Image: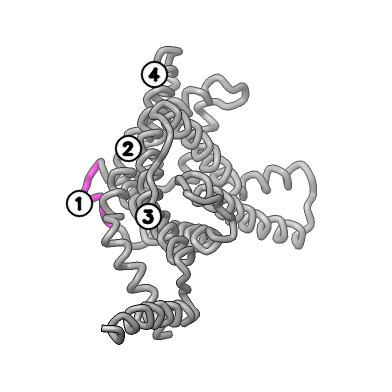
Amino acid sequence: MVHFIWACNKIKKMFVENTISIYASNVVFFIMLSFFPFAMFFFTILKYIPGITQENLIPMIGSVVPGELGETLVSWIQEAYRHSSGTVLSLSALTALWAGSKGFMGITYSLNRIGGTKQKGNWFFNRFLSFLYTLIFAAMLVLSLIVIVFGNQILLIIDSFFSIDTRLFIGIFSLRSIAGFAIFFFYFLLLYTFVPHHDERPHLRNYVSGALFTSITWILFSNLYSIYIDSFSNYSSLYGSFTSIALFMLWLYVCVSLLFVGALINRFHIDGYSLFSPKSKNKIKNQFETLKESILPENNDK
C-alpha cells in the first residue's frame, strides 16, 4: 500500500512536470472547434439516407441524450434538414477534419512529450496521419455509440422481429457492455503503441496497463458524470443556454486528461517501475549502489 501511494505520487509529479493539463485544454479546444461542423456534417449526411427522417430522428435523440444537450442537437437537426446543401456539407466536412486533426496533433505531441521523444517526418506526412487518425477516432466514437448507447434500442428492434429468450437477452446485453469496453481498450492500446514516435520497435505488452486504465476510467467517469448531471446538476442557472456546451467541455477535458494519465502509466512501466510491486524501489536502490561502487574506488585511489 505504501509503495502504491509512492507510485501515485510519482505519476502525479510526472503529470505536473509535463504540463498535461495545458495540453489537455489545447486538445479540447480544437475538438470543440471540430465538434460543431462535424455534427452539422453528420446530420446533413443522415438527411440523404433513405428511411431516416427528421420525424423519427428527433424522438430518438431526445430519448438518448438528456436535457440541454439533447435540445441543442435537436435544433441542429432541424437546421440541417431546413437549410443544408452540398456546399454546407463540403465546408462542414473540411472544417471538421482540419480542426479535428489539429486536436489529434495535440494528442500526438503530448504523447511524444510524455514518452520523451519527438515527432519525425515532414509536416505534410504528419498532417496526413492526423487526418487519418481523426477519421479512425470518429469511427471508434460512432461504433462505441452504437454499441453502448443504442444497444438497447437495437436489441428491442431485434426482439420485435424475433422472439428472444429472456436469458439470451440478458446474455446479449452483457456482451454489449463487454464489446463496448473492448472497443475502447483496443483503440487506446493501438493509440499508445503506434501514434507517438518510438526510438525502438514498440511492443503491445508495454502499453496494456495504460490502455486498461484509460478504458476503465473513461467508462466509469462517463457513467458517474451522466448520473450526476441527471440527479444533482443545476448548471442551467449558472451557464444558461451554454449549459450543454459547458458540461460537454468539462467531460471532454477530464477524458483527455485520463488519456494522458494512461500514457504516463505506460511510461512508468517502460522505465522499469511498478504500481503495486516494490521492485521499482529496489531497482532505484540497486542503481544507487552501482553508482556508489563506481565512485568509491576512485576516491580510494586518491
Residue bearing the label numbered 1: 238
Given the current orientation, which residue lies at the most extreme left position? Answer: 238
N-terminal of the two: label 1 or label 2?
Answer: 2
Dominant secondary structure (helix, strand or loop) of the stretch shown in magenta: helix
**Residue type (three-letter) at the residue carrying disc 1:** Leu
**63 or 272, which is in the foreground?**
272
The residue identified by callout 2 is 30
Q: Earlier in the sequence, mark 4 or mark 3?
A: 4
Q: Where, quadrant-wise, is the C terminus in this rendering?
A: bottom left
Helix or strand or loop: what does disc 4 sit on? Answer: helix
Residue placed under numbered mark 3 in the picture: 114
Residue 117 drawn at (x, y percent) = 39, 49
> Measured along the vertical axis of the image, is residue 29 above or below residue 97?
below
* 257 on left or right of 140: left
* Vertical side of 271 occupied by 172: above or below: above
User: Mark 2: which amino acid?
Assistant: Phe
